[in-house]
Image (cartoon, rainbow, N blue to C red):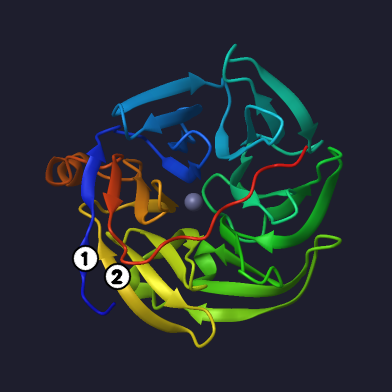
């Protein structure tokens, strides 16, 4: 696993902020979002087609809903998207949020609750909050003081939750109680040196190791959360790498999103595939992700 790998261009989406990579194992499709273009997208590797749904508001992330369709974290809350009609229905709203706050990354826990955090658009420190939407559609505020909420996954034994506040340059771990969805005892699992870039989206593999996309970093890094060690890196041929998800029939492909936002015209000229989807062979299979149980 020490050998360095490179990701290949998969689909030149030219996303402004591609994010939220998620594999739908039922349909064998990659779900992802373009946050600032207000789109939810489905890329089908078999047909090489990408389908975009215009949601009319920011879309921070997406999860599969067990009872059908997709759940989205939108500008100020959560919504259901019907993939047949394209109709977006609000499920829960955080009242009183200023326009400059929007939802960002999130995922479902093993019990099917949808966790997603907010951020101030420019990443102003401390204004983000982590919310949990339960299958009964009740919304819970879990913790606050976040700058840019990202990268949330659960350990294979369902006893820990890993979370990234990008501007903290750490991967934090909580004790997680799957029965009630509570988290306690936050501490640092991995300190990420600033020269690697900004830690963004995250996935977990079948060995319990973490794969973190690096914004301003051209890479995905595999970390051991048990001892904080860097295990491996995948080079991605674009600067702003935003999220990753294991996919494919054997969950042994790593799908990667990226962003064009923030790159100057001269940088874009040298980074023609900024905002594309990429794919890599990580050398290990991923852990299955969870659907929203509501
Ligand atoms: Zn992100």
Q: Residue at x 20, y 39 (%)?
A: 265
| 244 relative to 208, above or below | above
Q: Identify which residue, 155 or 185, lies in the foreground.
A: 155
Q: Residue at x 32, y 35 (%)?
A: 45
- Tag 1 residue: 5
Q: Residue at x 41, y 22 (%)?
A: 51
| 242 relative to 210, above or below | above
- Tag 2 residue: 233
Q: Position of residue 63 (x, y in %)?
A: 60, 40
Quadrant (top left/top right/bottom left/bottom right) for the C terminus: top right
For disc 1, the neighbor class at 10 Å (few under 14, some 14 to 19, many from 20) is some
Q: For disc 2, does the CB lie below 8 Å from ligand 1?
A: no
Question: Which quadrant holds residue 56?
Answer: top right
N-terminal of the pair, mark 2 or mark 1, is 1
Q: Residue at x 81, y 41 (%)?
A: 135
Q: Are marks 2 and 1 in contact (CB under 8 Å)?
A: yes
Q: Position of residue 109 (x, y in %)?
A: 69, 55
138 on left or right of 98: right
In the image, farthest residue toward the top: 85
Helix, strand or loop under label 2: strand
In the image, farthest residue toward the left: 270
| 29 relative to 211, above or below | above
Q: Position of residue 290 (x, y in %)?
A: 63, 50
41 on left or right of 260: right
């Amino acid at each position: 696993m020490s050998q360095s790998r490179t990701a290949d261009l998969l689909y030149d989406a030219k996303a402004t902020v591609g994010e939220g990579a998620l594999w739908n194992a039922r349909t064998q499709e990659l779900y992802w979002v373009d946050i600032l273009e207000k789109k939810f997208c489905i890329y089908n590797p078999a047909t090489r087609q990408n389908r975009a749904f215009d949601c009319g508001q920011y879309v921070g992330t997406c999860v599969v809903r067990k009872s059908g369709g997709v759940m989205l974290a939108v500008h100020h809350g959560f919504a259901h998207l019907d993939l047949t009609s394209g109709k977006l229905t609000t499920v829960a709203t955080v009242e009183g949020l200023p326009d400059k706050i929007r939802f960002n990354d999130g995922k479902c826990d093993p019990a099917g609750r949808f966790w997603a955090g907010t951020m101030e658009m420019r990443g102003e420190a401390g204004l983000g909050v982590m919310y949990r939407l339960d299958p009964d559609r009740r919304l819970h505020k879990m913790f606050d003081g976040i700058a840019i909420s990202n990268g949330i996954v659960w350990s294979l034994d369902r006893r820990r939750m890993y979370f990234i506040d990008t501007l903290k340059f750490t991967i934090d771990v909580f004790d997680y109680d799957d029965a009630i969805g509570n988290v306690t005892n936050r501490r640092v699992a991995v300190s990420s040196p600033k020269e690697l870039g900004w830690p963004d989206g995250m996935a977990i593999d079948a060995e319990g190791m973490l794969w973190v996309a690096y914004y301003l970093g051209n890479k995905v890094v595999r970390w051991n959360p048990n001892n904080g060690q860097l295990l491996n890196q995948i080079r991605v041929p674009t600067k702003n790498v935003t999220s990753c998800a294991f996919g494919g029939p054997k969950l042994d492909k790593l799908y990667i999103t990226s962003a064009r936002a923030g790159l100057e015209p001269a940088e874009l000229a040298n980074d023609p595939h900024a905002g594309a989807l990429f794919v890599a062979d990580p050398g290990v299979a991923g852990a299955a992700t969870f659907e929203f149980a509501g």
